[in-house]
Image: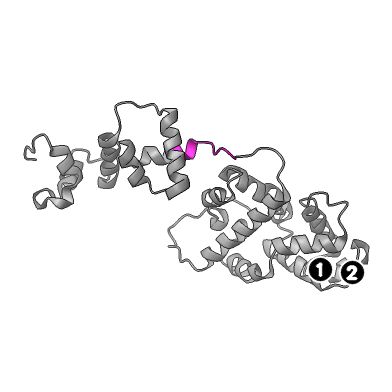
Amino acid sequence: MKQLGEKGLEMIWASMKYPELRGCWAEIATSLPHRPQMAVYKRARILLYRSAERKWTQEEYEIVRRFVEKNGTTWKELATDLGKSEIHVKDTWRRMKPKNLKKGSWTQDEYQNLFDLVNLDLRVKAHQKIAPSHRQLRDNISWEAISEKLTTRSNKDCCLKWYQQLASPLVKEGIWADTDDYLLMEALQKVDAVCVEDVDWERLLDHRSGELCRQRWNQMVRMIGGHREKPFIEQVEVLARRYCPEMLDYRKAESADLSPDELTGGTD
C-alpha cells in the first residue's frame, strides 16, 4: 500500500472519502488470511481509537452516565467526545451499575412493570421476521432493553425473575404450557366466585385437570405481595392485568413454531 504520510491513519479510517483508498481494508485483511475482513476492521477500529490511558476515571464514568440519561446509547458520538472506541464505551456502560439498581425483594410495581415490558416486547417480536439461521434466545426477549426501561433491576435479574419465579416450573415438566396461564386467568374472570373455594377447578380448562389448575393458581398468587390478606376477586384482578388476554393469540402462534423440547424448556 502506498505511503500516506502523517494523516495516513485518519485517511484509512475514512477511506470512503478517498477514492484511491477504497478497498484498502480488503488489502489489509490479506495480511491476516485466517481472520474475516470484518473482524480485522473491527479490531483495527478498537486499536486506532483506544486511548493511551486504559483505565477509566470516575469523571469519565459520570460523563457516560449523564450522556446516556440525556441522549440514550448513541455510542459513536460519545466515543468521539471521549477519544475512545465505541466498543469500549458500550462495554463500559454495560459494566456500570446504575445508581438506582436495587437488590432484594421486588415490589408489586416492579412485578407489574416487568410483565408490561415483557408483554410489550413479545408483541413487537410478533411482527418481526427472523431468519431461520438466526439463533434466538428463549422467547427472543430483549432483557437488556427491558432492564433499561425498568431502571431498578439488571437484565440478569429480570431474566431470572421471569423464568425462575414468574414462569411456571410446570412448563418445564411438560404438564403445563405458557398459554395455559392466559387461558386460566381468562376462565377465572368469567366464573361467578367470591372466594377460591367457590371455583369449580375441574371445569375451568378442558385440557387440564382441576388439581393442576389449582396448583398453578397457587404459584401465581405467591407472586402477589401480601397475597394471604387479599380477597380472591382482587387477586384475580391483579393477575389478569399481568396475563392480559390480548397476549394469548401471540403465545399460541409462538408455541406452534416451537419444538417439543423448546416448549418444555429443553436445550439442544
Q: Is residue 219 left or right of residue 32?
A: right
Seen in the picture, residue 100 relative to 139 is either above or below; the reply is above
Q: Which mark is residue 193?
A: 2
For the N terminus, the quadrant is top left
For disc 1, the neighbor class at 10 Å (few under 14, some 14 to 19, many from 20) is many
Verify whether residue 94 appears in magenta: yes
Three-letter amino acid code of the residue under disc 2:
Ala
| Residue 18 image position (x, y, % from top left) | 12, 50
Query: Could you tell me how far apart the alpha carbons at marks 2 and 1 are, in whole angstroms?
Result: 8 Å
Verify whether residue 191 appears in magenta: no
Three-letter amino acid code of the residue under disc 1:
Leu
| Residue 225 image position (x, y, % from top left) | 79, 49
| Residue 133 image position (x, y, % from top left) | 43, 58
For the point 6% across and 40% down, which residue is it? 2
For the point 56% across and 45% down, which residue is it? 155
Q: Which mark is residue 41?
A: none
Nearest to the observer: residue 52 or residue 131: 52
Label 2–label 1 contact, CB within 8 A: yes
| Residue 150 image position (x, y, % from top left) | 59, 50
Q: Is residue 254 left or right of residue 37?
A: right
Kind of element beneath mark 1: helix
Nearest to the observer: residue 144 or residue 203: 144
Q: Is residue 15 left or right of residue 208?
A: left
Count numbered badges in the picture: 2
Whether residue 205 is visible to the viewer of this picture, yes or no, is: no
State the residue position of label 1.
188
Query: In the rendered structure, which segment of residues is drawn in magenta?
Result: 92-100
Kind of element beneath mark 2: loop
Upstream in the sequence, badge 2 or badge 1? Answer: 1
Quarter of the figure with residue 262: bottom right
For the point 48% across and 40% down, which residue is it? 94
